[in-house]
Image (cartoon, coloured by chain):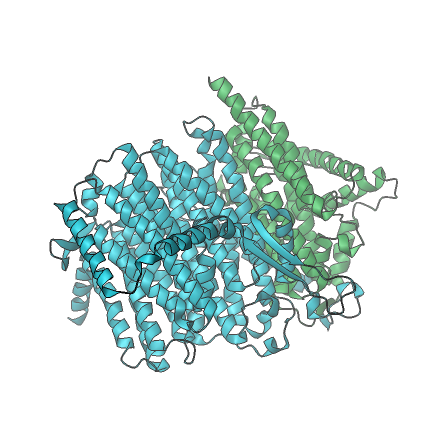
Amino acid sequence: MNAHLWANSLNSVLNHPLGSTLVITVSWPVLALACLFRPHSVRYVARFLFPLGALLCVMMFLLAGAFLISGHSPESMTLPLGLPDLPFHVRLDALSAFFLLILGFAGAGISTFAAGYFRSGEGTAPGLLGLHYHVFLASMAVVMLADDAYLFMVAWETMALSSYFLVTSQHRIPEIRRAGFLYLLMAHIGAVCILLSFGVMQGGSWQFTFDAMRSASLTPFWATVAFTLALLGFGAKAGLVPMHVWLPEAHPAAPSPVSAMMSGIMLKTAIYGLLRVTFDLLHVQFWQWGVAVLALGLFSALFGVIFAGVQTDMKRLLAYSSIENVGLIFTGIGLSILFAASNLRLFAALALAAALIHALNHSLFKSMLFLATGSVLHATRQRSLGKLGGLIRSMPWVAALALVGTLAIAGLPPLNGFVSEWLLLQSFLYTPQLPHAFINMLIPLGAAALALTVALAAYVMVKFYGVIFLGQPREASLAHAHDANWLERIGLAWLAAGCIAIGVQPQLALHAVGKSTGMLVGQTIAPDPSVWRIAPIAPEQASYSGWIFLAVILCTVAITFLAVRLLAHGRIRKTVPWDCGYPWQTSRMQDTAEGFGQPIRHMFGAFFRMERELPAPTDLTPRYRVHVEDRFWRALYQPIATAVQRLADAISFLQGGRLAFYLLFSFLTLLGLLVFVL
Amino acid sequence: MRGIAFVWQFGEVILAIALAPLFSGWIAQCRAWMQNRTAPPLTQPYRMLRKLFNKDAALAENASRLFRTAPYVLFGTMVLAAAIIPSVVTDLPFARAADSIALIGLFATARVFQALAAMDIGTAFGTLGARREMMIGFLAEPAMLMVFFNAFLLFGSTALTSVVDNYATHPSVIDPSVMFAAIAFVMVLLAENARIPIDNPATHLELTMIHEAMVLEYSARHLALIEWASSLKIFNYACIGLALFLPWGIAIHGAHVGSVLFALSALLVKLAACGAALALIESVSAKLRIFRAPEFMAMAFLIAVLGLLVHLLLGANTGA
């Protein structure tokens, strides 16, 4: 009887996926309010409410997954909320469900970790953090569910504001306040662009539902204007070069679970928005759009990874690596637009699948690495790579799990990062078939830029992992570093399991994106009929099997190990490191983070503005300093900032300080508006 | 039918594992002849492996588990690569696990593990070697990818077994781009396998080392596995080159014992010629300074791109 009841209720949940997701989405703000009940109690907020939030994330993940598997048709609903005559519309379709799946899976890991991470005495009270954190989660879910521009913008702004408060949770530090301001500024510039884009897309009908925008017919000029505005707006949120400047400031400033959330999930809302606008609302009209997205994406990817290579702060390094990964996702989207606009639907689906799977992958490994830096930060109080080292011995759990994330983000088989990069390279192989002269010769070279980016990412991640976890500790205090607690380990392990699962069984990911690509470009990539491999176009052309990779390598390792033990012996003598017989070595003789960045500074010097102080041979206290700066700051942002300052100075006479004048201004404005409207 | 395929698969892997040290020994022998030195016997690498396996391992006190696992992982990745590359037959069940792009990823996995292991002890030379190896890696990968891109345009596949099959069924495909791709591939092979002009496998000067600097802390069985994996790596690269550019003789689908024996002898002849050619290149060129390496690799990349453009331009002409 009881089992029957359960089965029935489960059925009804699965039959009303939109309602159920809405219930979960509303439960997060309820949790957020509950956080205010005892805001200073770490035990109540972190150990009790955060695990509940993680549970909701798991449910969201399962629901979205069930929706994607079940073949449910899109479901929409009009909510009795909003302004009069302007109600909120929500809709759950394959694309929303896929991004909700990302939100649920990554969110579950991050919330579990956060439950173990937050302690008292660090910046804002845990209750306030919990409030912003859960509002942030809910607003991202609403962004993905929104079906009209009004609700979308409300959720988008809530997301920006709640994350702003999370970034500035340690607001007593001036740099963090500065980073928060920059973040808020860029978020709003982006939001304005998106708002204008929606304004163009309604096409004079003054209907702001996405349905109306889908059927609106725009002239090519206005469609391109809408697309450009959307690319700028969503690009600013995603950290596309040259709108990336906020990202390396804001991500390190936030507490680690928040960095993980912003990098792992929030950047994906921008990807979602761009896909929704370009493919769903504007129906991909011109291949030139694809070239623009592709060029920006490739440049961002290369730019991000080169800057990541020269960073000396572990969280800044990961932030630049996020720019790289967003660039890779945009590269896939650009290719997909190119193919779709040239009516090569199958290849468009391949490129889009690569982009979507990379978005999923990035949410797993980047969140995980940000969380791992959080554990390192708690254990050592150090963020600078120059003061870490050797933590694999004192923090074996974090080191082992971070190794999975490191290998995954470096794009190595049989982990998940490789799968999406492989699919992306596969889709590049078909670019010579594009029906545009010269473009089809230039774009294959993009594959080389992509290969360079991926290989550089491996370099950067060897630097990241090697300098933090391997070698000798660079500071004496590191010997007492403690490992992460159990909740933190579970959070990390959950994300690591995702990395391994997608890497070994990439069909899972292909299934998850199949309906989205079907919806957006009208084709799906069929996973190979044999379950143990993927072959996106045809097995004779290219195939990949994570199972065989893992199985053969593991078997060989096991057999070799046994053979060596049986035929030879396992004797070991512990000694001091040999190092070619040099008599004494200190931890300062290892390569530093700066040293690891040296080849990159040397080869890609054109990207940087570099200041260097080299010690003279006679210096008694030699000091080496190198400072690397983004050229975009001086070339683009400072002139704009100066111009805004000048403009503000020029019109500051309006601010006379007399109330009568202000009332006069208001009156004149009203008068003007009345004339304009009538 | 499938059963026999697994026999070929297994046999090919065993062959690669067994032959790889011999191939390295052959290159060393050719080098010695060309440089007027007394050549070591062909079996020298095997004796070396036996000696190393019987020694006690001297392990640094602070070595972590990663350091001790890495040699096994390295060996495992190279064995997997040998299982994927069609050196004797193309009817390989495991070959579908990876096309050539995944093969680049596989070699990258080996490289990253080796670099991480080199950083584990925290000595000056280890980290130096790791950094340089990763640098050569990111310079070599784009060039390598362009070579495979070229092969894809010619044969419509990135799976090496399909490339060989297609070559056997359409042997008339001779394209000038193949020459460019072959030159670029040889340059990548030299760089990736720690050969002159990028690295000198016989060097004793620590500051110029790349590969050797990474394995300085290894001894005994761990070192033996690494050495074996290195010789497997160059053997694998040679077999990739043969599959792409000189695939004649390789037994294609429906192989029987006779054709496999023929393929085996063809492989031995080709490898012998390859080894001699490699030794010749190494003997007549000088080692480059480490910061000249980017130029060398950029040249390899540009040659590969040139091949690609030649193919696309010629293709456009014939198409019109």
Confirm whether residue A381 shows in the render.
yes
Q: Position of residue A268 (x, y in %)?
A: 37, 54
| Closer to us: A469 or A238 | A238
Confirm whether residue A543 shows in the render.
no
- The shade of chain B is green
| A287 relative position to A596: left or right | left
Q: Quadrant of residue A499?
A: bottom left
| Closer to us: A448 or B77 | A448
- The shade of chain A is cyan
Q: Position of residue A445 (x, y in %)?
A: 52, 36
Residue at 61%, 62% (x, y): give it.
Answer: B69
Residue at 27%, 49% (x, y): give it.
Answer: A195
Residue at 41%, 72% (x, y): give it.
Answer: A171
| Closer to us: B218 or A457 | A457
Q: Quadrant of residue B269?
A: top right
Q: Is A380 placed above or below A289 here?
A: below
